[in-house]
Amino acid sequence: MLQVHTAGVFDFDGYLSDRRSRVEGKLTEYLATGEPALLWEAMRYSALSGGKRLRALLTIAASEAVYAGSELQKLAPDLDCVEAVMPLAGAIEMVHAMSLIHDDLPCLDNDDLRRGKPTNHKVYGEAMALLAGDGLLTMATEVLIGASDSRIPRQNLLDVALGLSQAAGPSGMVGGQVKDMQFTGATDSKFDISTVESIHSAKTGALIRFALWSPAKLLGAQQKQSQALWRLGEIIGLAFQITDDLLDVTGDATTLGKTPGKDQATQKATWVRVFGLDGAREKLASMEAEGKELIEKNLLDNLDAPVLHSLLKYSIHREK
């Protein structure tokens, strides 16, 4: 049993270590060797390369926040809610890994470094990297549908599968990437705050928003909680991207595990470019305050184990 607090102090590091370990174990299981062997090797190279696992952690934390009183808790009171959302968490991490592989390709951001290692295409070539991303994207749906607990209502699972496709597709990550491409290199007069919000709400925010909303839908949580988690996902998704924009200016390759300064070099539409460093930091502070209020108002955290509070803070104050 994980000890999440000692003498009244929440052990957030212990929580992260335990939940990440469970996610890594499941991903390793889902991505066991298959054929063609080289394809699976390339898929595992990116999907099992560590990282923050923020999206999976948000999924797990949301499930823990809403399980009591949910539809599934009444149907299966002995169910481990963390185990129940592991296929969902794994699917989300596969989609995220796909997006990083494709984002790093020479035809997009042309990056050579990711999580402190050579990017997928530098190891396996551009064609195999593209196919590895395709494999992970389609594998995500296979795992979500095929590995989910049979006691989960089928309509809930169908709604979540639809939501994952929307988060990853033209109205989500793919559409956001297209807008990002369209405004890369544009002069300041060609975009404004609404443009930047639109890009990041889709490119980065869509999957994070889905990560928080989807476990509530899957488990059959109360509508008020589902709505609150959707809004919290919007806040964390945008805050995460603003922090990324700041780190691209203030971070270094050793700490970040990727190449800094790319946004400025390619003239991307970022929060720092619109508001400057101080303005971006002020926006983060206001979003953190809103997120805390939302969590407290909707009773989404246990006072002895404020997981969502801690993940909100972690997303904003991280150094990589």
Image (tube, helix red, strand yellow):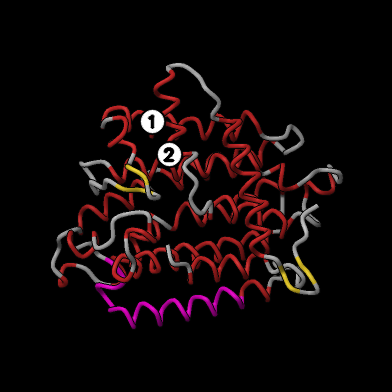
Query: Mark 1 is on which residue type?
Result: Ala
Could you tell me residue 112's position as x and y percent?
27, 45
Range shown magenta: 270-293
Q: Identify residue for label 2.
A: 46
Q: Is residue 309 above or below residue 114?
A: below
Could you tell me residue 251's position as x and y percent?
34, 67
Q: Which label lies toward us, 2 or 1?
A: 2
Which residue sits furthest top? 35
Q: Residue at x 39, y 22 (%)?
A: 38
Within the image, what quadrant is residue 123 found in?
Answer: top left
Give the camera-side residue of 136 and 199: 136
Asked if residue 140 lies left or right of residue 146, the reply is left
Could you tell me residue 184's position as x and y percent?
19, 58
Q: Quadrant of the C terminus?
A: bottom left
Q: CA distance from mark 2 to mark 1?
A: 9 Å
Marks 2 and 1: CB-CB under 8 Å? yes
